[in-house]
């Protein structure tokens, strides 16, 4: 019997939908550029370059970037959606995880980078 259920990888810290793995693997042969997006009302989702402005309307125009430490990854966000409260800053809108090459051109993410995004955007136990 064929099992059409959605396989999922689980660990103590994150859950990765296998559709994400499949989409990123497909990008290697198709030339499509894939990013990851996450928002308060949206789980981490793999998106194409063309879908980015639908999630973050200021994408690649008026967005701001935050470099993820020890990586070549950037979080793209709308600076107008930053809430400053008690000396801390909180992103209240969508975020798109992107990767660029040495020329500053967008390139597709790898599954390892999506995993890093999950770790970076998940709430820490001290929050």
Image: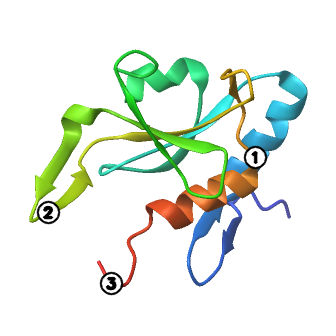
**Left or right placement of residue 28 versus residue 68 in this view:** right
The image's mark for residue 64 is none
Of residue 87 and residue 39, the one placed in the foreground of this image is 87
Of residue 85 and residue 108, the one placed in the foreground of this image is 85
| Disc nearest the viewer among 1 and 2 | 2
Q: What's the distance in space between the residues labelled 2 and 3, CA to CA? A: 16 Å
Check disc 2 and report the residue beneath it. 87
Image quarter of the C terminus: bottom left
Check disc 3 and report the residue beneath it. 126
Task: Name the residue: 13% across, 52% down.
Answer: 84
Residue 86 % position (x, y): 9, 65
Which image quadrant is residue 46 in? top right
Q: What's the distance in space between the residues labelled 1 and 2, CA to CA? A: 34 Å
Dot 1 alpha-carbon crowd within 10 angstroms: few under 14, some 14 to 19, many 20 or more: some
The image's mark for residue 110 is 1
Dot 2 alpha-carbon crowd within 10 angstroms: few under 14, some 14 to 19, many 20 or more: few
């Amino acid at each position: 019997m064929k099992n059409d259920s959605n396989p999922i990888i689980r660990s103590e810290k994150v859950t990765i939908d296998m559709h994400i793995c499949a989409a990123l693997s497909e990008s290697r042969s198709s030339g499509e550029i894939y990013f990851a997006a996450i928002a308060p009302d949206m789980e981490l989702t793999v998106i194409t370059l063309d879908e980015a402005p639908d999630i973050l309307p200021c994408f690649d125009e008026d967005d701001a970037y935050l470099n993820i430490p020890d990586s070549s990854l950037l979080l793209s966000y709308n600076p107008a959606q930053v809430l400053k409260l008690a000396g801390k800053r909180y992103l209240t809108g969508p975020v798109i995880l992107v990767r660029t090459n040495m020329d500053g051109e967008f390139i597709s993410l790898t599954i390892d980078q999506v995993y890093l995004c999950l770790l970076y955007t998940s709430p820490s136990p001290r929050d």
